[in-house]
Amino acid sequence: MSIALVLAVIVVALVLFSMDSIPIEFTSLVVVCLLALSGVLTPAQAFEGFSNDTVIFIFTLLAMTQGLAATGVVQMVGQRMAFFARFGHQAFVLAMMGVVAVFSAFISNTVTTAAFLPVAIGAAQRAKVPRSKVLLPLAYASMLGGTVLLFGTSTNLVVSAALKRQGMAPIGVTELAPVGLPVVLLGIAVVVLLGRWLLPAREGKPGTEGFTLRDYLTEAVVPGDSRYVGKPLSEISEGLGLRVIGVVRDGETLDAKPSYVLTGEERLLVEGRREDVLRVKDLQGIELRPDVRLSDAELEGPESMLAEVGVPPGSPLVGRSLKETLFVERFGLVALGLHRRPGIQRLTKLQLLRRAYHRHSLSTLPLAVGDVLLLRGPRQKVAELAPGHTLMVLEGHEYEPPRYAKALLAVIIFLGSLAAGSLGWVPLSLAGLTGMLLMIATGCVDARTAFRVDWRVVLLIGSMMALGLAMEVSGAGKFIGDHVARLGQYGGPRAVLALLMLLTIVLSAPMSNQAAALVVLPVALNAAAQLGVDVRPFAMGVTLAASCSFITPLEPSCVLVYGPGHYRFTDFFRLGTPLTAVLVVFLVFAVPVVWPFHAA
């Protein structure tokens, strides 16, 4: 019965994780709650993951990376990447991927991508390279770099903790490097060679700063004295070329039928590119009317500008709406439009069209990581977004990080903390906590910024550790492992290894790579026991495979570049499929060489 309950919880988690409308942190806590209520785990066991030494270290590691970003370490390196553009487009992409992979070997791949994103856009513009040719390689390089060292990604750390809990040796700091380094080199080579043909070359028209290929959602109003009053909607939708997806009048949502006669004070839900949004703003008879407006002098003065900004991980705006955060009063900028990746964009349109029941408007929709806002306002207000903790300016403006003088100190504290924990001088959690406090005390980063980490990662890992324990306690891992091990009768341990890695890659799309690794690991350990071989190659194969899912844009690093790079879902599939296939084939043969299938 316990096995069935655990498998049912896994199915529920897969469904919830795959739904964009449900926050990851909610699903994570649902998993913990179900495991405790069903009796599979005691409450103490269910919540044990949140106090785990490794989870605490991951939190402090994320906080310390805020210090590296605040002192300009990443920016100083990134600003020199444009130098390589003089040797050609491919040389620039190669150099950028190499630099990003090095940083990602020490820092979380999501944090690395967020830190390098504005820098890479600016460098690409200076190098006259389309950003669509640069940003996807940036995300892939950050994911590849996580396969080299223990600290490269939280997946490595949580698998190491799970192995230690099973009484096995944890993953060494450099244990993954013999396979991880070739994976990085091979992955970069595949992206550089195939990216020339498989990556799109999407650019904006001259003078549009690269905004033209992104669809934004916005709201417009037809005032009572508009010249369109009494005329059919087709005058706007067809005559002006605006894509009106809905009409709201007196709180009721109506279909955007061309024959609908406008009576004034209707709100129009419009989807279009940057030019469409600006055309709405400039049209006589149609207005963009934010909930709180800046003065026309502020919006249209000589110092006014248009800016495209992204919502990074850990931003205080995540999960909150523009209205809730008093966006205009706080930032002095007006949001003209909202862009989201296609799956969420479709959901957002449905939410807006159902507003008669839920009273949704653009200003009341909760923001998510990777959302892109089209803002307008004073240039100085845009410059104040420079630290990039709340919003990242994506249009390539160069800002000087405020704490360059502390950069070397931040690097010393960061590397010293990693060394102290890795060499066993102090526990990992204590080493990370000491490093984080030292960065705050020495002024490398202020406390508010340091604690601006993506808490969803902490909640996700804690809950998935509980799910991994449940698979072990209930026997679900052994049950699935027994069936997987039967494949060994036909193809040997190598075939089982390939199946486990493919299962990890498939599950990492809806569940995240950490969750997928923790779900598959008990299966791998039990499959090894059934085959009578050492568990190490299976555990390492699952760990490395979790960082090799490049086919969809659902990985957080890919979400961050999706909007700024003007990508479509098919772009990831075209380049990610051969990249994933090449790396899986390599891992199937390389993993048993480094960690042989010795008899257990």
Image (spheres, helix red, strand yellow):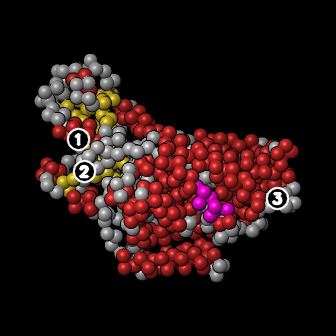
- Residue 109, given in percent of the width and then of the height, sits at 52, 60
User: Mark 1 is on which residue type?
Assistant: Leu
Q: Nearer the viewer, residue 164 or 271?
A: 271
Distance in Å between CA atoms under marks 1 and 2? 10 Å
Give the mark nearest the N terminus, 1 or 2.
1
Residue at x-position 63% and y-position 75%: 422
- Residue 270, given in percent of the width and then of the height, sits at 30, 34
Q: Does the magenta stretch include residue 180?
A: yes
Q: Is the magenta stretch mostly helix, strand or loop?
A: helix
Circle 3 residue: 597
Labelled pair 1, 2 in contact (Cβ < 8 Å) = yes
Residue at x-position 48% and y-position 76%: 411
Q: Is residue 171 magenta?
A: no
- Residue 211, given in percent of the width and then of the height, sits at 31, 46
Crowd rating for badge 3 (residues with CA inside 10 Å; few <14, some 14–19, many 20+): many
Decide if residue 188 is on the left or right side of residue 347. Answer: right
Tell me the number on the disc at residue 278: 1
User: Mark 3 is on which residue type?
Assistant: Phe
Crowd rating for badge 2 (residues with CA inside 10 Å; few <14, some 14–19, many 20+): many
Q: Can residue 409 be seen in this view?
A: yes
| Region rendered in magenta | 179-187
Circle 2 residue: 306
Q: Quadrant of the N terminus?
A: top right
Distance in Å between CA atoms under marks 3 and 1? 63 Å
User: Mark 2 is on which residue type?
Assistant: Leu
Instruction: Say what secondary structure mark 3 lies in.
Output: loop
Instruction: Say what secondary structure mark 1 lies in.
Output: helix
Give the mark nearest the N terminus, 3 or 1.
1
